[in-house]
Image: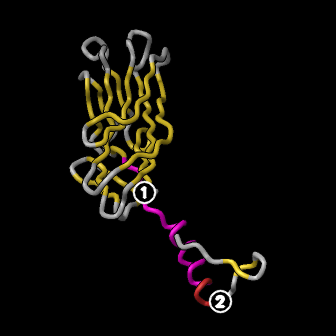
């Protein structure tokens, strides 16, 4: 984003160059690269201790793309804002806990944990800004240490999703 120089006691100089800069700045601000990735195949049973959600649908994106069930970072992006929501069912007090993580290149970077007592449970990972580079990938992982005695169902479609926005 280009800064417009001020002149004449703090008043901006109105000319075609500055008006074009203003237009470019506004277009850049409202056309940010962002995606929502989700699994569009209905519910998924979490019947292993660790499981990653295989994304098969993505909404939006120019330099953030869906490939191999993951969100990939494209050229020119150095920072992204991420958040995620998971909607679980068959979740009750017989479950020790569920760890919900956003992974970057296979490593957990943001986590949320819940040991809820309701059949339906929603877990969210709030916004975080992380450094990325071209070809980094993001995905969601679930850890259910009680998987052998109690499988949990991950609700599909928009109920469980990963949001990624390029911010740098």
Give me the residue at 33% from left, 44% from top. Answer: 39
Magenta highlight range: 19-37
Q: 64 or 17: which is nearer to us?
A: 17
Q: Position of residue 23 (x, y in %)?
A: 58, 78
Question: Which label belongs to residue 166?
Answer: 1
Give me the residue at 25% from left, 42% from top. Answer: 105
| Alpha carbon distance from label 1 to label 2 | 31 Å
Give me the residue at 53% from left, 77% from top. Answer: 24
Q: Is residue 29 magenta?
A: yes
- Label 1 Cα crowd, 10 Å radius (few <14 / some 14-19 / many 20+): many
Main SS, magenta region, reads helix
Q: Is residue 58 left or right of residue 84?
A: left
Q: Does residue 2 lie above or below 129 as drawn?
A: below
Question: Which label belongs to residue 15?
Answer: 2
**Circle nearer the N terminus (1, 2):** 2
Q: Is residue 111 magenta?
A: no
Could you say whether the residue bearing mark 1 is in a helix, strand or loop?
strand
Q: Does residue 19 lie above or below 111 as drawn?
A: below
Could you say whether the residue bearing mark 2 is in a helix, strand or loop?
loop
Q: Does residue 128 lie above or below 89 as drawn?
A: below
Q: Nearer the viewer, mark 1 or mark 2?
A: 2
- Label 2 Cα crowd, 10 Å radius (few <14 / some 14-19 / many 20+): few
Q: Position of residue 104 (x, y in %)?
A: 30, 42
Q: 10 or 66: which is nearer to us?
A: 10
Q: 2 or 159: which is nearer to us?
A: 2
Q: Quadrant of the C terminus?
A: bottom left
């Amino acid at each position: 984003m280009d800064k417009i120089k001020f002149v004449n006691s703090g008043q901006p100089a109105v000319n075609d160059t500055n008006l074009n800069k203003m237009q470019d700045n506004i277009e850049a601000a409202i056309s940010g690269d962002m995606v929502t990735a989700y699994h569009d195949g209905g519910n998924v049973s979490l019947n292993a201790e660790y499981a990653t959600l295989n994304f098969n649908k993505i909404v939006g994106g120019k330099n953030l793309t869906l490939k191999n069930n993951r969100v990939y970072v494209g050229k020119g992006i150095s920072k992204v804002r991420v958040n995620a929501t998971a909607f679980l069912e068959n979740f009750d007090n017989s479950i020790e806990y569920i760890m919900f993580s956003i992974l970057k290149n296979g490593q957990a970077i943001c986590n949320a944990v819940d040991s809820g007592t309701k059949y339906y449970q929603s877990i969210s990972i709030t916004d975080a800004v992380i450094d990325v580079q071209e070809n980094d990938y993001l995905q969601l992982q679930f850890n259910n240490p009680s998987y052998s005695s109690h499988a949990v169902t991950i609700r599909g479609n928009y109920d469980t999703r990963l949001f990624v926005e390029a911010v740098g």
